[in-house]
Image: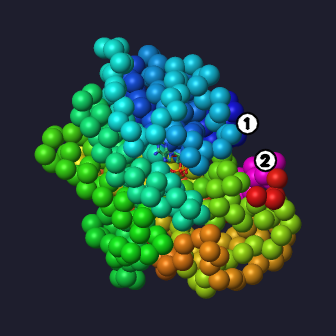
Amino acid sequence: MTEFLLKTDIQEIAAALGDKASAFAGKTIMLTGGRGFLGRYFTEVFAHLNATVLDEPCKLVVLDNLITAGEAGATVGQIENVTFIKHDVIQPLDWPRDKNDKIDFIIHAAGIASPFYYRKYPLETLDVAIIGTKNMLALAQKNQARFTFFSSSEIYGDPDAKHVPTPESYRGNVAAQGPRACYDESKRVGETLCYIFHENHGLATNTIRPFNVFGPGMQETDYRVMPNFANRIKGGRPLNVYGSGGQTRTFCYITDAINGFLRVIATGVPGEAYNIGNPKPEISMVELVQSMETATGGKLNYNIIEYPDSYPADEPLRRCPDITKARHQIGFQPTVKLDDGIKRFLDWTDKTYTGDA
Ligand SMILES: NC(=O)c1ccc[n+]([C@@H]2O[C@H](COP(=O)([O-])OP(=O)(O)OC[C@H]3O[C@@H](n4cnc5c(N)ncnc54)[C@H](O)[C@@H]3O)[C@@H](O)[C@H]2O)c1
């Protein structure tokens, strides 16, 4: 177990998965973006399932081009039954290499997920979600593997208040031009590619739309709001709230999220998209500061500032998932309360962050 994740969280995910884990026994799983935040959890959870409950171990092939991955997870290839290949998914990959290599599942989690990085790498953001997804779908077709695409809640854009909480059927209110378009629009095309491979080629595809997942393991240099605030708390600096501070989000603790993702991967209805997140509470960024004050037990200073150049403005005003579909079809039910999740996260960042990112 790496020191970058909490062992108790990995155990909690495996326990919540229960008998659904058996879907992975003896299977080969290809995971793209496997050195990222979510990818490192998948790797540790599969390693834990191999060691504890699976009759026959699953094999994991992890791909990542390391564009935003840090040092965390550098030893992933040393874990039993895990192979790491440095590979950019916008290049085609020839697989299987022999008949023992056939892939059963592809989890396509490669992406440029943090607004800070998709501001910095707009074309790479576009390419990984479009060309990368098309390449991985072609590979799934060749291997007759189940395919899961990590899309985003950002495909809904800036929903009208009457569509919040937002169900999967909402079509979105998205700008084709603007600082966020490279992420939102390319994830939408990625979903269209999944739809075509399912409808026209009979491939078992699923799309996951995560809503702000957070937890131990997020890099200090990730710059999404949770690690950003945690870094400044550790450094004893005031928190910077961008824009008006009134924009809302919901936050899903990592153990609930990975449990939901694995349920989709193992048992999602082919062709379907699923919101995975925690609908309660929907809070503003100023309220998030207050929740962090509760968790740390002290007063936190904060400033409300203009969006810096390094961060894409044009943020959606509200973001909150309707998870009825995931609850009914795959039995997904988040259980970790926001305050508890923040406490677990800040306890971990206090031990691992430097405070000067
Ligand atoms: N974590 C969330 O809250 C969240 C929310 C919405 C969507 N998502 C999506 O889920 C996926 C995983 O998110 P995450 O939080 O782990 O992100 P992350 O940034 O921590 O990890 C993504 C990984 O993909 C790799 N990558 C990027 N481009 C690549 C390429 N061309 N080839 C190979 N590897 C490449 C990066 O190096 C990185 O290690 C992403 O696609 C993201 O857009 C995540």
The stretch drawn in magenta includes residue 349? yes
Mark 1 surroundings: few (<14), some (14-19) or many (≥20) residues within 10 A: few
Q: In this view, does 6 lie to the left or right of 149?
A: right
Q: Where is residue 82 in the image (x, y as percent from the top left)?
A: 53, 24
The residue indicated by pointer 2 is: 352
For the N terminus, the quadrant is: top right
Q: Quadrant of residue 29?
A: top left
Question: Label 1 to label 2, Cα distance in Å?
Answer: 9 Å
**Which labelled disc corresponds to residue 52?**
none
Q: Where is residue 344 in the image (x, y as percent from the top left)?
A: 71, 52
Q: Secondary structure beneath disc 2? A: helix
> Who is closer to the viewer here, 63 or 123?
123
- Which region is colored magenta? 343-353
Question: x and y percent of residue 331 in the render?
Answer: 38, 48
Whether residue 260 is visible, yes or no, is no
Q: Position of residue 261 (x, y in %)?
A: 44, 46
Query: What's the amino acid at mark 1?
Result: Glu
